[in-house]
Every structure is written in structure tokens, then in C-alpha cells.
Amino acid sequence: MQKLPLNTSFKYHTGIALIISLWLVLFLILIAPFDIAELTFSARLEILPIYGVISFLVYMILIPIQNWIFKHFKKWTLISEALFISTFNAIQIVVTFSYYKSNIVNGDYDFQKFSLEIYVPIFFILLPIIIFLRWFLNKKIPNKTKETLILKGDNKLDVLQILPEELVCVSSADNYVEVSYLKDGELHKKLLRNTLKSIQNDVDSLLKVHRSHLINPLHFKEWNGANAIVLTQMEVPVSKNYRTSILEMNQSSLKTNTSSQSQ
């Protein structure tokens, strides 16, 4: 099933709920469909805005549920969207009918007649507006496309393209560098004809811990004795020349504990 974008902002959904509610109230008061035309204009102003309030509240009550489902399943699909609108419709028809039968309105229709002759026709007029507003809203999701890190060798075809957080370590290997990186949670390695110094100049977030090793600080796990550190799924040595500077770095993830320093 095709995934859909979903904007989970309460601010934007409040805007949608307000537009739906205002449209519904104006439609009922000004167009006066069905037997509403029999009411005086003042009576319409007194009775009909409550339908808009009901629509607003029902929509907003469903937003936390919508957001929880999206966060839990990490996706939103056409089926999810259809279920949201169907649930909104099901709850609203029950609540609006309850108001219709209350002492304020004193409606004559039973639930079946109210649903088929009043609610459903109005909802199908409202449905395209709901679909459009939610579609338009999702187009306003900020672009959170992650920046790609591109590492190149001397050969123009020798290119590695990964996300910055996937890079674990770069190690010198004669006339090459060995890039250790994660893909789908597994450690992979790739040789590029390049130098460690050139890679360090290109990727300033890397930290030199040995004359032959650059690490991504995000993947630091722990110290293994005084002369080695454990990274994600690998371990690299640490030179004495760099050990002090690592310990003095203002990064809690790279500070060894007391026991490690004493080893």
C-alpha cells in the first residue's frame, strides 16, 4: 500500500477543523437545505452553529489518535486516511443526531431518516473539502530530506554515497582508505583510492584518534583499556598523541570513565 505524508501539527489541524466548521455553519445558515428553510434567520443563528462546534470538536479529538497511529506504525496510507475520515463521519453522525433530538432542536426524524435525508447529503458535499484540506496540509510538511555524504576516490566512478550518521570510521590502507559504514544496521567496508588527510579535510566532523584512523564521534561506545576505543560493530586503536586531546574534548560520549583511564 502506497505511503502518504502526514502532517501531525496540531496548529495546522486546528486550522482545518475551523475551516470545516465555519463552512458547515455558513452552508446551513445561508443555503438552508432541507427543512432548515422553514426556520427564521434568527432561529438558524441560534441553533445551527452548534453543528459547527460538534464538527470542530470531533475532528480535533481524533488528531491525537491519528498521530499515535502514525508514530506507532511509522507510516500513513490511503487505508489510514479512509479510516480516519470514516471514523470522523461515524462519530459526528451520532453526536449531531443526539443534538438534533435534543430539546434545543426537537427534530422529528428518526436516526435512519436523519442519516439518509439530512446528514449523508451534507457530508458528501463536505467530503471533498475535507480531502482537499488534508491533502493541501500534507503538502506543507517541511522538507526533512537528510543531507547525503559523498566520499570519492581518484577514479571518478569510485564513489560512496551515504548518510553522515552511517559513517563509522575511515582507516588508511596503503594508497587507499577503507571506509567503514552502516547499511541496514550492518557494518560494510569500501576501499577508495584517496588519502586520510583528504578525507579529513572533506569531512570536518571526523575525529583523528590514530595516524591511520578517523572516527565519527557519533559511533563511540566505550574505551577498551587506555589505547583502544569501541565503535559501532568495530574497534580501533588510539595513539598516545591523540588520547589526551580526545579526553579533553567537550563531548561526553568521548570521555572515558575513571576505571577506563586507570587501565
Image (tube, helix red, strand yellow):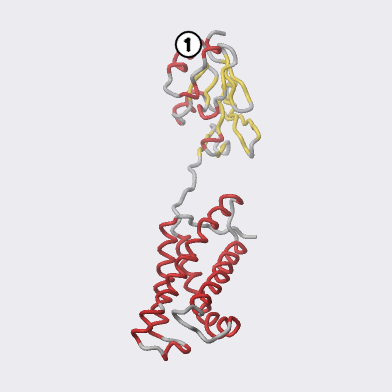
**What residue is rendered at 45% in x and 24% in y?**
251
Which residue is located at x 53 percent, y 78 percent? 124
Tell me if residue 157 comes above or below residue 108 in the rendering.
Answer: above
Q: Position of residue 161 (x, y in %)?
A: 55, 39
From the image, which quarter does the C terminus lie in?
top right
Residue nearer the viewer, 56 or 94: 94
Residue at 48% over, 14% down: 242
Judge left or right: residue 237 versus residue 143.
right
Q: Does residue 204 lie above or below 8 as drawn? A: above
Q: Residue lying furthest front in this view?
A: 103
Q: Quadrant of the N terminus?
A: bottom right
The picture quadrant where one finds residue 9 is bottom left
Q: In front: 137, or 236?
A: 137
* Residue 97 horizontal/vertical position (percent): 53, 77
Which corner quadrant of the image does residue 31 belong to?
bottom left
Three-letter amino acid code at the position of disc 1: Asn
User: Residue under circle 1?
Assistant: 241
- Kindly give the residue lying farthest to the top in the view shown: 262
Provide residue 149's location: percent of width, then percent of height. 50, 38
Residue 162, by quadrant, is top right
